[in-house]
Image: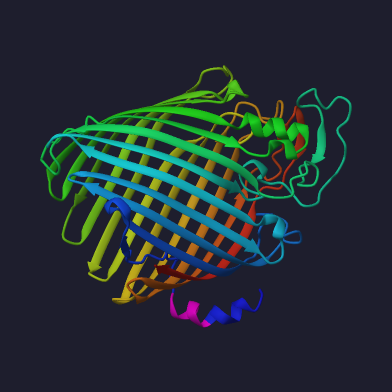
Amino acid sequence: MRPLTSLVCAGLLLSPSLSVRAEVTPVSHQGPLGLEIQTEVESRYGHDSNLLWLRDSGQAIDSDFVGISPEFRMVGERGLDRYQFSYLGDYRRYGSSHADDYADHQFQFDGSWRFSLRNAFKLMYQYRLGHEARGEGLTEGFMLQGDASPCPSDADKKGRALCGDATFGRFQINEPLRFKRSEVGGRYSYGAPDARGKLELALALSHKELGYLDKHLYLHDFERYMAEQEWQENTAIVELFDQVSHVSRFRYTLQTNLRRYPANPRKDSDEFFLITGVMSQLTGKTRIDANIGGIYKRFVNDPQAESFKGLNWDLRLEWQPLDYSKLALLSSRTIRDPGGDGGYVSSQLYGAEWQHHWSPGVATTLSYHDIRDDYHQSVVCGNDNRHRQDDIHRWGMGISYDIRPSVNLGLHYQQADSGSSFAGQPIDIGGNCYGRALGYDKQQLSLSLKVAI
């Protein structure tokens, strides 16, 4: 690594822990109209061993980086009503690859109104301008260098020709892909706060959209490929909460997600969930938060696509033998849409996290996550529909030191590696097939300072 390694090695040996997100006590300032204003800024300096998530270590770009993440909130209250507007930025600059610099922005409004003891309404709007790093998302498995063979004349006849490898240069991808994502939702609930058997017949409705920016900067085939991954989703939720006691709560949920891809209707899908959950303090030292549900996912315009019927879950068991030490075991299974061709990905996660406070101001965290992604796709680049399974391992450690309640210093290390049973799975872009190199090995080391102003 670069000189940064020697700077922090001693700290890592003293703190076997995971990347700890810096948290500070907000400092409130009185603004106009009685609003409370809170501002926080986190600066970060570090090193990334594999910016582009490449499998070939010979092509990997390693770089030091500097970043800054400002956060701004305006909070207002009137009786039981509460309003909050927030902005979160994320700016990063890489010393060895300025092409991968980025600036992300997120704006959010949250409003909560209580019309009586039992009737409440919440409104949320979020708008995000973000990025996909090269080598993630739509460019997963792309290379800096590879077989540059042109497409043969019969390449548009699916499944019959491979047009070399998918490289960033082939499609003029010289910087991260930028996207915009928005979400608006409302939730009505009925029930007295914290009352036993309260009904949050939380009639909740939301609408989400994802779109990519600057598509015209890329070659026509990749521009169309990006447009085919843009989606809109409508969600409806009906929930019932049963607050058995102050430390135990049951949840019952019906949920429907209707996702549509305007430029690629073959990927359109409907999802139906039936979920039951429990959150309970089992003993003075043990706490469980578990949600288990049945899901049915169907593809409305692709008769060849495989529907999914099965279980989803999200389980977290916490054990706190001491006031200053906590161990968490977690497991989850989710179904999500892959990039490129249609179908779905069944993703299972198993992990453990440990947090220990050595003193009121010093905490360390250690974590490990094991993830298995099973791809179920009806068509992969023409007629090649071989099954693909990815195994991902993530480790993290770090130390967090509160210099004062409003100032936090952190040291973070993260490592991730991924391998695929179909490491060369091709991708269909514009009716042509391009080879990929799936998998990566990546480390990131950073030093952070977060201040509430």
Check the image and report above or below for 354 versus 32. Answer: below
- In this rendering, does residue 338 appear at all? no
Q: Position of residue 100 (x, y in %)?
A: 67, 56
Q: Main secondary structure of the magenta part?
A: helix
Coloring applied to the structure: rainbow
Give the quarter of the image for residue 71: bottom left
Give the quarter of the image for residue 162: top right
Q: Position of residue 224 (x, y in %)?
A: 70, 30
Q: Is residue 137 magenta?
A: no
- Magenta residues span 10-15
The residue lying at 78 percent from left, 44 percent from top is 172
Q: Position of residue 316 (x, y in %)?
A: 32, 51
29 or 372: which is nearer to us? Answer: 29
In which quadrant of the rendered image does the N terminus lie? bottom right
The residue lying at 35 percent from left, 52 percent from top is 74
In which quadrant of the rendered image does the C terminus lie? bottom left
Image label count? 0
- In this rendering, does residue 310 appear at all? yes
Check the image and report above or below for 307 versus 251. Answer: above
Check the image and report above or below for 27 versus 81. Answer: below
Q: Position of residue 2 (x, y in %)?
A: 66, 75
The residue lying at 32 percent from left, 62 percent from top is 29
Check the image and report above or below for 205 versus 55. Answer: above
